[in-house]
Amino acid sequence: MLIVDNVTKKFGNFTALQDVTLEFSNGVYGLLAPNGAGKTTLIKMLTTLIFPTKGQILYDGVEITKLDETYRNILGYLPQEFGYYRNYSPMQFLIYIAALKGIDSKTAKHKSLELLELVALSNVKDKKMRKFSGGMIQRVGIAQAMLNDPKILILDEPTAGLDPKERVRFRNLIASLAKNRTVILSTHIVSDIESIADQVIMFKDYKLHCCDSPVALKGDKFDTLEDVFMHIYGDDELSA
Amino acid sequence: MTIIKHELKKIIMFPAIIGFVVLAIALNIVVITTMQNSYTDFIAVTSHTTGINLGAEFNKQLAELEPSLYRDLLQLQTENREDVLYGYTTDYIADIAVERRELSGLLEQLMRSKYQRFQSAVDAQQKAGDSMTLYFADATYWRHQALFNHTMGLLLFQGISIAALIMLLSLGYESSAKTDFVVYSTKVGRKMNNHKLIAGTIVGIGVYVLIASITLSIYFTLNPMGGVWNSSVSSGFNFVRDGFIVRPFVTWHSFTVAEYLLASIGISIALVLSFSLMAHAVGLWLKNSYVGFFVVVALNGTLFLLPFYLPTTMLNFAISQTPIWLIMMRDSWFTDGGSNVIVPHFETVGVIGSIVVLAIISFWSTLRFNRRNMV
């Protein structure tokens, strides 16, 4: 189990997150908040890219920075702005990332082919990525995140820049990957998570506002998660 | 090892690196073609017959050669040649150094001690007859400078520049491709930079060796050495210009030209390594590779200029042992080094010291990088 224990993150005088406590077990967690609310800050702390100013993040009771590569070995991460090597093919890129994940070359090749099939990129597996669409690149991104069959899959705004058709396809893909693992999906688009999230986490004023199932959040008062979002953040924050 | 292989492949594919290597070799060829000389070519061939040790036998062999302008010239330069190291004392060099640098106390003591020890080296080489070897006769200084100062200097500047650039491009690669978040969140994490250090160093040294091999092959094809390879670099024909004073070129240990070349390449490789380490330390603080390169250049420019503005203290002499100063003093490697250095074997001490210090700085930068927020 992954526990965020009373975590605060400050950048100089600016507080990005304050006193956040969360527990993640298997299932899909949707981080839903407007841009700049601290979603990416939390995600970067969960991926050891930045460190809490106060508090700690524990995996199975041990601080993740102490676990070091043992923790990162069970992690799959698709950042908000997924970078790639333009001159590499998806196959070359996946084999490279597999090496960084400590996967032996034989397994890497096998796993890469399997994942490219899953994300429907088999037909372009040896083509240079420089001509790929945003949707295709995001699919390469999800494939690289899945290479090590992660117990924790973290996706930061995975549908950003995708057209509605690709967003639906991506959502279905994520739902299919969610079995027997923790999936943390950050978005400011309500429809991305409404149907697939087991728990929705919302931040307001850099603090945890709520963490509950979509059904519980809607309660009797709201018809949709979008209504909840509008109620919390106001009309002008509504993105989808 | 797999990661290093991937990193090596990435570096080798940098268009800037490939372009640099091609341009460097092209420039070196142009420079080398200006260094040809028919008299030294004659000596190179003749030395197979005459040998390289001056004396009666040498004179006899030379006299038996077909008469020519160059044979006569060589006879003129080698007959009745006196041993310049016979009775040569180093005290006066110490006096000049002490006076020039206005040394006193410990610094004066160290400088005089260096030249006392150097006297033994001079005596040993005098006994071994090193100064009575041919090298390139009166063309020695020019030919020695052409190879060990100009050509090796060109190679060295190219080597350190490319080594620093390779390391910085390698470290900045993920940032420029925006893959840093993905890479640093994988199992290897920030240890990735250790793999980049190894790969960058391998390619940096490899590129230097490649450029040097091609350049020197062309150099020695156009400027054959013949039997001169076995001549001593401390030949009486070789000399050092020390300000207004000209004095014999003497090394701490006896070196043939071939051995001196190999030793110089060894020091050059160590300097290339030190620039790789320097660039690694800088690259861990800066995301932009080209800004990093500018910082490396500025840092070395400052280190080069600093001694001119500092009083003559131990710090001043310590700065003279830094890589950029070792490069600037490349034509004095393995010699006493004149008044700029206070320790014997300054190039070896300097290069080992630099590598140790830069490795410590690089390690410290790595520790800092590992605790830094990736924003």
Image: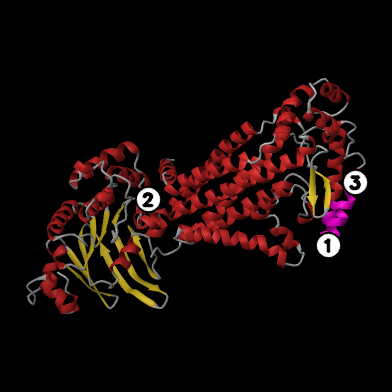
Badge 2: how crowded within 10 Å, few (<14), some, or many (20+)?
many
Residue B187, numbered circle:
2
Q: Quadrant of residue A30?
A: bottom left
Residue type at tag 3: Thr
Residue type at tag 1: Leu
Q: Chain of mark 1?
A: B
Residue depicted at x 80% and y 21%? B65
Can you identify the residue that label 1 sits on? B103
Residue B136 placement (x, y as % from top left): 76, 35
Q: CA distance from mark 1 to mark 3?
A: 20 Å
Residue B96 in magenta?
Answer: yes
Q: Secondary structure at mark 1?
A: loop
Badge 1: how crowded within 10 Å, few (<14), some, or many (20+)?
some
Q: Is residue B126 visible?
A: yes
- Mark 1 or mark 2: whose residue is earlier in sequence: 1
Residue depicted at x 49% and y 57%? B283
Q: Is residue A149 visible?
A: no
Classified by dominant secondary structure, the portion drawn in magenta counts as helix
Relative horizontal placement of residue A106, taking residue A172 as reference (left or right) = right
- Camera-nearest label, 1 or 2: 1
- Mark 3 or mark 2: whose residue is earlier in sequence: 3
Q: CA distance from mark 3 to mark 2?
A: 64 Å
Q: Secondary structure at mark 3?
A: loop
Q: Nearer the viewer, residue B343 or B154?
A: B154
Magenta segment: B88-113
Can you identify the residue that label 3 sits on? B89
Number of callouts in the render? 3
Residue B200 placement (x, y as % from top left): 49, 47
